[in-house]
Image (tube, rainbow, N blue to C red):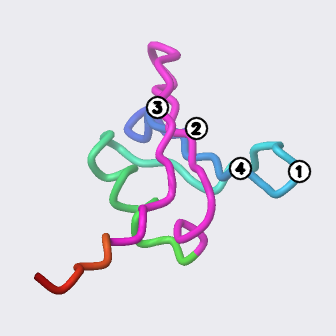
Amino acid sequence: MNMNESFDIFRREIDGSFVWVGAAETFARARQKVVQDPASFDREFLIVNALTGERVVVEPPERPPVESPV
């Protein structure tokens, strides 16, 4: 692993396991990669700080609420 890429990105598969999909230099870039991934529509991602071990789960975006007529 490149020392500049200290945030690993994993995608949760249907069976619950995680698959490594990439790395990024910062948390913000890792999150951006997750949001841009077409699989992010219905999958959870895990971002792990390789230096500290801190983990953040990024859940799929919720659908926007349906506006009811007033």
Q: Is residue 17 left or right of residue 9?
A: right
Q: Which mark is residue 12?
A: 4
Residue 56 colored magenta? Answer: yes
Q: Residue at x 50, y 58 (%)?
A: 60
Q: CA distance from mark 2 to mark 1?
A: 27 Å
Query: What residue sits right under mark 3 in the picture?
Result: 56
Report helix, strand or loop for mark 2.
loop
Give the Cα distance between marks 3 and 2.
20 Å
- Closer to the eye: label 2 or 1: 1
Q: Quadrant of residue 63?
A: bottom left
Query: Going by the picture, which residue comes out furthest to the front?
Result: 70
- Residue 15 badge: 1
Verify CB contact (< 8 Å) between mark 2 and mark 4.
no
* Placement of 18 over or under 38, stated as above or below: above
Q: Residue at x 33, y 60 (%)?
A: 32
Quarter of the image where the C terminus is located: bottom left
| Marks 1 and 4 close (CB-CB < 8 Å) | no
